[in-house]
Image (cartoon, rainbow, N blue to C red):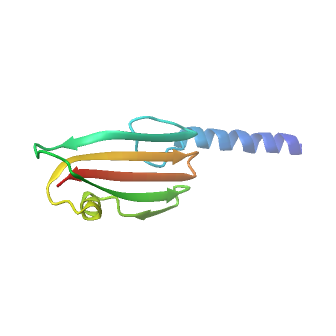
């Protein structure tokens, strides 16, 4: 009887994880176990990109999230006043740790 209970609990956990997707940060690609991607978001007609600024936020278990991944924070980190492009990167490790970053290039 105990083995049946354990099996039922394991099945419920597996279904729950499958439905949640274990993806606690947005990404254009899904990687249930591991995901580390960078992708383009937006570009302006501002010429040149001599500087780069990066701002990140993290999530643990999808329960606790901290950080400032805004464009303004990335601009401040790189000392940028004129934005040439905005990109993002996402990292997800088994739904336990997630990181979302905004990368701004400009002058």
Q: Where is residue 37 shown, x and y percent of the image?
A: 42, 40
Q: Residue at x 21, y 43 (%)?
A: 42
Across the whole image, how many numbered discs are drawn on residues? Answer: 0
Of the 4 image quadrants, the one containing the C terminus is: bottom left
Please, is residue 29 above or below residue 49 in the view? above
Q: Where is residue 83 shown, x and y percent of the image?
A: 17, 52
Q: Residue furthest front?
A: 50
Q: Residue furthest right?
A: 1
Q: Where is residue 14 shown, x and y percent of the image?
A: 66, 39
Q: Who is closer to the viewer here, 46 or 22? A: 46
Q: Residue at x 49, y 44 (%)?
A: 23
Q: Residue at x 55, y 38 (%)?
A: 32
In this rendering, position of residue 58 left or right of residue 81: right
Q: Who is closer to the viewer here, 70 or 22? A: 70
Q: Residue at x 18, y 42 (%)?
A: 43
Q: Where is residue 1 shown, x and y percent of the image?
A: 89, 42
In this rendering, position of residue 13 left or right of residue 81: right
In this rendering, position of residue 34 left or right of residue 73: right
Image quadrant in which you'd find residue 2: top right
């Amino acid at each position: 009887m105990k083995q049946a209970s354990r099996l039922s609990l394991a099945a419920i956990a597996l279904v729950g994880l499958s439905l949640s997707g274990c993806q606690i940060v947005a990404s254009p690609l899904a990687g249930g176990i591991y995901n580390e991607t960078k992708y383009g978001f937006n570009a302006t007609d501002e010429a040149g990109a001599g500087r780069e600024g990066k701002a990140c936020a993290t999530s643990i278990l999808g329960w606790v999230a901290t950080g400032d991944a805004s464009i303004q924070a990335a601009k401040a980190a790189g000392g940028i006043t004129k934005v040439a492009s905005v990109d993002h990167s996402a990292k997800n490790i088994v739904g336990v740790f997630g990181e979302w970053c905004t990368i701004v290039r400009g002058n």
